[in-house]
Image (tube, grey):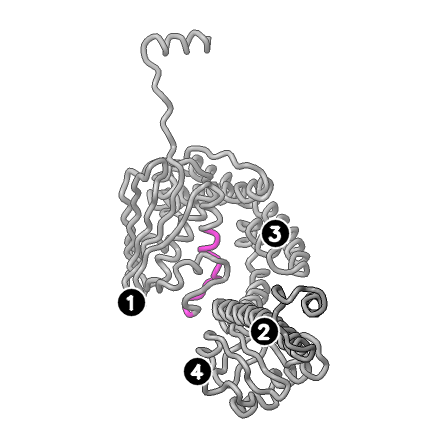
Amino acid sequence: MLVLGALGADYFFLPPRFALGFSDFDQMIGFTFYILNSLVIAGLGSTMRSVSLEAQSKSYESEQAHLNLTRTLERITDCFCTLDRDWRYTYVNTHAEKYFGRSRESITGRVIWDVFPGLAATVLETELHRAMGQQVPVHFEGVWPVTKRWVEVSVYPSTEGLSVYFRDVTERKEAEHALRDSEARLRINLAETKRLEELLRSQKKHLQNLVKERTAELEETSAEIEAISYTIVHDLRAPLRSMQAFGTMLTEEYHDKIDQTGQDYLRRITESAVRMDRLIEGVLTYGRVAHAEKTLVEVDVDELLRSILESYPSFQRPNAEIDVRSPLPKVLGNAALLTQCLSNLLGNAVKFVHAGVTPRITIRAEKRDEMIRYWVEDNGIGVPKEAQESIFRAFQQLDRSYGGTGIGLAIVRKAVEKMGGAVGVESTLGLGSRFWFELPEAKPEPQLIGRDMATAISHHA
């Protein structure tokens, strides 16, 4: 409109010397339309350039978003792929590509049932159809037919198809299966344990902890066995004390009528009865203070070992050759638990040897900082490396042909841990074993000399 107004003023009102030089009104109208057309074309060009730039910007942003998404899917540790509504692969990430054992180019665009015909009539086929047909997310586990390995699968539907995440869980499934087998073996062994009440008494606390880790039903069974065990323990103490009394009477009153060998037998009977009485008292104390802090006392390991070796004929020549590298350091511990620990280690060393081989055992000790490590070394059948941790768990047996319950080393471990120590083994299959346990060293009392001794005596007086 401004252009038309300017041209009209030029034609009708301006003097000729200022006019644009139109000869008539038609020329002016033609020129006006030319100018307007040029302006329109220029405006349209500017608008088109603006639209084109905006479209390019959106396309770039879309490409960047797609690139970022692809990078993310390539970085995740799960296998991932997408299917369209015709069951064709539209995307396969690197992990899925490796698991399939095929390149993504060879399967992209192909129907899943054609690529993997083994999926027919499997839980994978059923669940994929359910997700697509009902448009609901599904999560399941199944065996991948190509590798025969377990996979955990999560499927998320959309209007375009399915997004599928999956991972290999074969190791977890095998572990669960092994756990179920272990629990089944445990139940069988617990039935056998009912007949081994004396052994169960010494490990009451251990059994309770073991039962608590399993089921409430087994907890109730353990409580019943515990009550029976305590009754038997109390009943055993009376005949043991009778053995001690009659042994002492025989020794004192018939000393002249019994030869040296008989007197030695009486001494062993009396000492064994005393040691058994102490063991029972230790078990009862162990049960009472199982949840309380245990006070450790000084234990003379040399004296303890001498008593054990004299009490068991299987530890004596010619049944076994046991070399004790005395003197052994004294430790802070519990005599009953330490006796159980050493008896079990020596019993295993004597038992687990090849047929016809005389057991040869060495017992020695070494200082390690504030701890004393005791070694029980044998010439037995040895322990394979993969079993050197598990043998300290209850009911673990390497070779059932040797008998036993599989709880002996679990008792050792529990006893040592209750005394603030640790236990382990170094072994080569077929070449013997070196079992060890560590306990705190018993520090000697400081000696009083000179004025300190006089002060102590005066205070005592």
Which residue does the image show at 66% across and 51% down from the upper left? 227
Q: Nearer the viewer, mark 1 or mark 4?
A: 4
State the quadrant of the N terminus.
bottom right
Residue 404 horizontal/vertical position (percent):
46, 63
Compared with 118, 163 (above or below) is above
Q: Residue 327 falls in which quadrant of the image? A: top left
The reply to whether the magenta stretch includes residue 128 is: no
- Can residue 176 be seen in the rendering of this structure? no
Residue marked by disc 1: 356
Which residue does the image show at 66% across and 85% down from the upper left? 129
Q: CA distance from mark 1 to mark 4?
A: 55 Å
Q: Residue 452 falls in which quadrant of the image? A: top left
Which one is earlier in the sequence, the residue at label 1 or at label 4? 4
Q: Nearer the viewer, mark 3 or mark 2?
A: 2
Residue 443 horizontal/vertical position (percent):
37, 29
Residue 43 horizontal/vertical position (percent):
62, 71
Residue marked by disc 2: 45
